[in-house]
Image: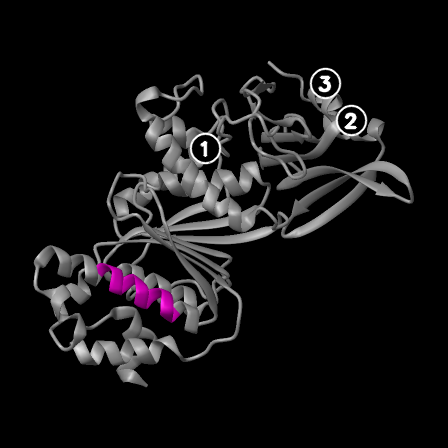
């Protein structure tokens, strides 16, 4: 069992940041973060505490910092992440009030990194970290070791988180709103929440949507078991239900089937989502409706080729529309969580003013080949 004050004292000389999250009942603040600062040439530590979307700051000496850790922080937060120039370590509150320390993480930290000769893969979700969803998924043993037969899944989960981290590594932790459409059993949702709330220290509000009431209820129970207070699940159909009218920092869809992806992207566009990560699935709409009409007819002769061309055309149209809606877009290969050949990800970030260029070309193509595409019809009804 680790004494948090002792661990923090040892870390202070090389501290980059310490994050205290998942408060217990009665804690004065929802989250706290500690980092070194220099004020008028004097080295100090700034304690930043969050309550009701407000931040409170105090600048402390090393002695005051340890006193605050002992009297205000230790035992009041279920998760503590201490990051130094040497790496990171996570601490989990035990029932007896002490902390259990996980193995040191291999998380690459700003300004640091492995030596050039160290060729070992450094995963963001490191072996030894207390990540409940990976234990429940069977990727980690209860002792937080990787199950050898699940190593491929471990790599795939890390791949998704690495893509998210690429987008958010330079974003300072603060309030963050994330929506996950078609979340299903939500293992990825739980892992993303862990990444943002526990690992990075964001003040996260995350909502997972799914059509199945029993699945949503079960996910809500698991979120409570994990102590993920900022994560909730709701039964909703994005194609017809009225959903919250709020700003969205990140919208995620993983294998939302067929046109459900289109409705989710349309919702993202209408609400100005800052970032979108979408892995589509089952793009059948164009395949069902496309007919011969031009130079591409040779690609429609054989069923398997027609199906694949239709899927690629669907995602190309989606990407083009997002570009017209003000997003910088790329399509990348993504190795997904279920070993599916559906391994294309649409990654988009709001960057510029809307325009109307790709939509016109997509509409001309749809009219020539007689196909329908739901996102095109949602953002450009009747070719207006």
Q: Nearer the viewer, mark 1 or mark 2?
A: 2
Query: Seen in the image, is 111 located left or right of residue 182?
Result: right
Task: Look at 59% across and 13% down and name the residue there.
Answer: 1
Instruction: Classify residue 381 by image quadrant.
Output: bottom left
Q: Earlier in the sequence, mark 2 or mark 3?
A: 3
Question: In the current view of this chain or complex, which residue is farthest to the top?
Answer: 1
Mark 1 residue element = helix
Q: Nearer the viewer, mark 1 or mark 3?
A: 3
Quadrant including the C terminus: bottom left
Task: Look at 33% across and 42% down and name the residue there.
Answer: 335
Q: In this view of the protein, can residue 26 be seen by the observer?
A: no
Q: Position of residue 224 (x, y in %)?
A: 44, 36
- Secondary structure that dominates the magenta span: helix
Which residues are the magenta region? 311-321
Question: In the current view of this chain or complex, which residue is farthest to the bottom?
Answer: 384
- Between the C-alphas of marks 1 and 3, the distance is 26 Å
Task: Say which residue label 3 marks.
Answer: 6
Q: Any mark on residue 13, and which?
A: 2
| Residue 215 shown in magenta | no
Residue nearest the viewer, comparing 117 with 66: 117
220 to 74, vertically: above or below:
below
Number of other residues with Cα within 10 Å of mark 1, as a class: few under 14, some 14 to 19, many 20 or more: some
Query: Seen in the image, is 95 located left or right of residue 63?
Result: left
Q: Earlier in the sequence, mark 1 or mark 3?
A: 3
296 to 315, vertically: above or below:
below
Q: Position of residue 7 (x, y in %)?
A: 69, 20
Number of other residues with Cα within 10 Å of mark 2, as a class: few under 14, some 14 to 19, many 20 or more: few
Q: Any mark on residue 226, and which?
A: 1
Q: Earlier in the sequence, mark 1 or mark 2?
A: 2
Q: Position of residue 150 (x, y in %)?
A: 32, 26
Task: Look at 72% across and 18% down and name the residue there.
Answer: 6
Q: How many marks?
A: 3
């Amino acid at each position: 069992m680790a004494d948090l004050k002792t661990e923090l004292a040892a870390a202070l000389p090389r501290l980059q940041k310490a994050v205290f999250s998942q408060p217990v009942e009665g804690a004065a603040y929802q989250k706290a973060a500690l980092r070194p600062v220099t004020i008028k040439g004097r080295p100090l530590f700034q304690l930043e505490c969050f309550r009701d979307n407000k931040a409170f700051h105090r600048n402390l000496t090393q002695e005051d910092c340890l006193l605050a850790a002992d009297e205000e922080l230790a035992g009041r937060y279920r998760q503590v992440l201490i990051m130094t120039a040497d790496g990171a370590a996570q601490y989990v509150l035990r029932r007896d009030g002490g902390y259990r320390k996980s193995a040191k993480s291999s998380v690459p930290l700003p300004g640091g990194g492995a030596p050039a000769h160290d060729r070992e893969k450094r995963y963001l979700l490191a072996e030894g970290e207390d990540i409940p969803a990976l234990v429940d998924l069977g990727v980690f043993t209860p002792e937080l070791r990787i199950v050898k037969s699940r190593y491929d899944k471990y790599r795939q989960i890390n791949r998704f988180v690495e893509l998210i981290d690429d987008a958010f590594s330079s974003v300072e932790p603060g309030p963050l709103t994330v929506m996950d459409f078609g979340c299903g059993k939500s293992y990825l949702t739980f892992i993303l929440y862990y990444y943002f709330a526990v690992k990075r220290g964001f003040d996260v509000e995350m909502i997972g949507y799914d059509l199945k009431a029993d699945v949503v209820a079960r996910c809500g129970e698991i979120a409570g078991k994990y102590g993920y207070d900022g994560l909730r699940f709701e039964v909703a159909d994005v194609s017809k239900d009225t959903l919250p009218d709020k700003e969205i920092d990140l919208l995620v869809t993983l294998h939302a089937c067929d046109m459900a992806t289109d409705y989710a992207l349309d919702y993202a566009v209408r609400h100005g989502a800052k970032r979108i990560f979408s892995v589509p699935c089952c793009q059948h709409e164009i395949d069902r409706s496309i007919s011969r009409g031009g130079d591409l007819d040779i690609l429609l002769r054989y069923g398997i080729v027609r199906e694949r061309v239709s899927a690629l055309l669907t995602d190309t149209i989606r990407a083009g529309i997002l570009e017209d809606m003000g997003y910088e877009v790329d399509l990348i290969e993504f190795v997904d969580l279920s070993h599916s050949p559906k391994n294309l990800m649409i990654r988009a970030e709001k960057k510029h003013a809307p325009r109307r260029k790709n939509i016109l070309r997509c509409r001309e193509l749809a009219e020539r080949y007689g196909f329908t595409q739901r996102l095109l019809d949602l953002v450009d009804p009747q070719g207006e």
